[in-house]
Image (cartoon, rainbow, N blue to C red):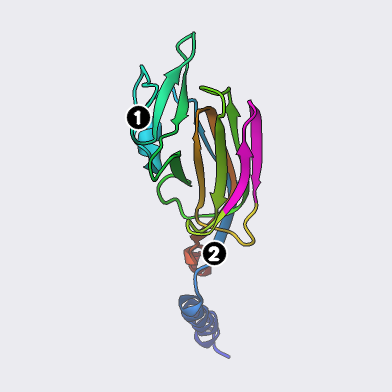
Amino acid sequence: MSTRAASAVPSLLAVLLFSALLVVPSSRVVAQGQYTYFDDFSSDKARVDSYLHSSISDPPCPTFGFDSFLCFNPDSLGNRRLAFYYSFTLEPYAYIYYRFPLGSQNLDITDGVVGFEIPGEISPGGRIDYFHSYDGSTWVHADSITVPGTYEYVLSPAQPREWVYIRFRGGRMLLDDLSVTLNRTTTTQGSNWGSIKALFD
C-alpha cells in the first residue's frame, strides 16, 4: 500500500466518526443540589412570593374585618409575624399559597422539607391548616395546628416534579420563619464537540 493510500485511511475513519457523532443526540448531564427559601416576614416579600393570598395589611393590625385577611403583626420587640384573621363570610379563613421554587429553574424535585414556627394565637380558638401538593390541584391536608411550636413536614413526590405547592389556611393564629428546602436534580443538554474536536487534535 502506498504512503498516500495509507494516510487516506485515518482521514476516511475520521470523517465516518465525525458523521456518526453528528447524528448521535447530545448527552444529558444531571447535577444534584438544593433549593432553599426562607421568610421571617420582616419584609413584604410574602405579597410577591405567594401566588394567591387573602388581602395583607400592614401594622397596626385591625382586630376584625368583614372579610378574612392577613396582617404583618409585630411582637413586643417589633419582629413581624404573619397573622391570620377569621371573618364570618363565605370565606371565613385567611389563606396564602406558594409555589416553589420561585420562577422556573428547570428542576426535578425529588424530596424536601417545609418548616415553620407557630408563635401562638392572636386570640383563643386559633388554628392553621397546612396543605401541600405536587401538581397545584390535588392537595394533601397534612395538619391542623392549634398549639404553638416548631413544625416540619416532609415532601416526597412519587416521581420528580418541577414544582411543589404549599398553602396555609386559618384564623386567630400567627405564622413565622417559613423555610423550604428542596433536593433536586438539574438536567441539561451536553455537547459532542469535545469528542469531535479530539478526532482532529
The answer to whether 154 is drawn above or below residue 149 in the figure is: below
Task: Check the image and name the residue furthest to the front.
Answer: 88
Magenta stretch, main secondary structure, is: strand
Please tell me in which quadrant of the rendered image residue 145 appears. Answer: top right
Magenta extent: 140-155
Residue 89 vs residue 160: left or right? left
- In the rendered image, the quadrant that contains the N terminus is bottom right
Q: Nearer the viewer, residue 133 or 90?
A: 90
Q: Residue at 50%, 67% (x, y): give it.
A: 192
**Marks 2 and 1, Cα distance to the nearest angstrom?**
54 Å
Q: Which residue is mark 1?
A: 65
The answer to whether 95 is drawn above or below residue 18 in the figure is: above
- Residue 94 position, x and y percent, is 43, 37
Q: Which residue is mark 2?
A: 28
Please tell me in which quadrant of the rendered image residue 61 appears. Answer: top left
Q: Residue at 56%, 34% (x, y): give it.
A: 127
